[in-house]
Image (spheres, rainbow, N blue to C red):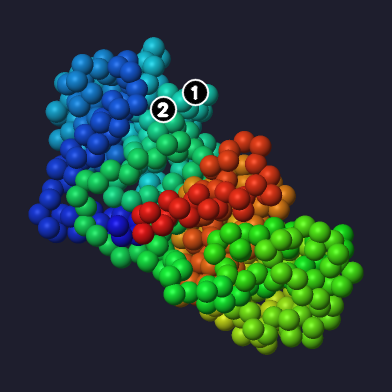
Amino acid sequence: MSPRPILTVEEMAQADRAAVARGATVSQLMQKAGRAVARAIEARFARQPVRVLCGPGDNGGDGYVVACELAGRGWPVTVEALAPPATPAAREAREAWTGPVVVWGQEGAEALVVDALFGAGLNRPLDSAVVRRLEALTANPRQVVAIDIPSGLSGDTGRPVGPSALSAVLTVTFQARKPAHVLLPGRERCGEIVVADIGLGEVSSSLFENDPDLWIENFPWPSLSGHKHSRGRLGVVSGGPWRTGAARLAARAGLRVGAGVVTLVSPRDALAINAAHLEAVMLAAADSADEVEAACADMDAVVVGPAAGVEDSTREKVLALGRTGAALVIDADAITVFRTSPGELFGLLDLDDVLTPHTGEFERLFPGMLSSSSTRISAAREAARRAGAVVLLKGGDTVIAHPDGRAAVTLNAPAWLATAGSGDVLAGLVAGLLAQGAPSFEAACAGAWIHAEAADRFGPGLVAEDLPGLVPAVLAVLFARH
């Protein structure tokens, strides 16, 4: 299958226009959309009274179609209209509805509410009467179904446009997800998201859902004629004797994801501690930056930063690794140590390298960029362009961005990943794929997806040490698909 795009509001409008240019009418598209919403409701809810909240635009028109469809299937339906229809297609849909219509805000005993007030293109705060209604409905979001997007959210940012936005248990959108469906807080407010194909036109996009369709063709599977060195040599730089666990987590993850030879590059005073906890991962002694450079001279990829220490020696080791030609995954302390001289770090990076900051580390390296950007997507894109490397901005809505403008958002990460050490495992997964020759953007996307899938398989109680051992089962599914 092709990668699934995430479309902005304007790109979605282009898709609408492309469908109309091919001969479809807005009313025909509205009928398809309404039927798709009705099918999704019928598949998930027992038959019960329904109230459809209809706004004046085409989103409200979709709502009238939903009302007709559900009523035709025997559901008791009432429409609550905010205002008369304001578009030709919405007026046509309203004329087809012959059931009850109540005035806005009238109390009702309906169990299920369909939000057809405003779509993803909302760009102004809602008036007080709408806000009060939404706030009352948000008290029980498990009985709300949103058409396109919960009313009150911006489709391009996922943030409330004004003081309030609705939350839903189910959101049915069309053609593709919008940024509001994948970015927080919108993603949490949408509940389950169903993407319905209603026959819109294709439009080009540089933003995608991060799933295997995006990168499976570039996944570095081993060949029968391969050997451990041909499968990639990965180095992981360890911290001092009291800071060794993070590097070991990264090393084990790199080994599990397929790197043929993984070496932990350890200070001499930490060798015994590391050796006591390792089997297949090799050890190399290196204290100075020059020794680290020599130990990693033949590596295909290197992870540096996990528990490395925010100190001059870490900065010197990163600079030395930049001379090796290895693909670098720069994480944690190796990011923070350049907070006062980010240009020095950017000067050694290239398109093979990946930065893996969480929000705090991102702010240290790119101060003010998150607050001044419209979304995390635009911030990650600008950071990647400025750094000249792939940026993996970690969080509940992880964004991966390439300097050429491509970006992806990870959708499968569970809450259980918010645990100490999980980021170190992610760095190792990305580096293990880089070591095997995966392109940097695809390696970062695949690493993030595998990381999230492994965590989801484990569920509650996950700790970072569990993650590497869960990777083989995820790889087996991917390999069967391949």
For residue 338, above or below residue 248: below
Which numbered dot is residue 96?
Answer: none
Marks 2 and 1 in Cβ contact (< 8 Å) = yes
In percent of width and height, residue 298 lies at 64, 83
In percent of width and height, residue 142 lies at 46, 25
At x 12% / y 58%, what residue is drawn? Answer: 22
The crowding category of the residue bearing disc 2, from other C-alpha atoms within 10 Å (few below 14, some 14 to 19, many at least 20), is many
Q: Amino acid at mark 1?
A: Asn
In percent of width and height, residue 439 lies at 48, 73
Structural distance between the alpha carbons of marks 2 and 1 = 8 Å
In this view, the residue in front, 351 or 219, is: 219
Q: Is residue 355 left or right of residue 70?
A: right
At x 73% / y 78%, what residue is drawn? Answer: 318
The crowding category of the residue bearing disc 1, from other C-alpha atoms within 10 Å (few below 14, some 14 to 19, many at least 20), is few
Q: Secondary structure at mark 1?
A: loop
For residue 56, above or below residue 133: below
At x 71% / y 61%, what residue is drawn? Answer: 279
From this viewpoint, which residue is outermost toward the left?
23
Q: Secondary structure at mark 2?
A: strand
At x 30% / y 57%, what residue is drawn? Answer: 1
For residue 324, above or below residue 436: below
For residue 447, above or below residue 287: above
Q: Amino acid at mark 2?
A: Val
What residue is shown with label 2?
144
Which numbered dot is residue 140?
Answer: 1
In this view, the residue in front, 156 or 448, is: 448
Question: Within the image, what quadrant is residue 241 found in?
Answer: bottom right
From this viewpoint, which residue is outermost toward the right?
269
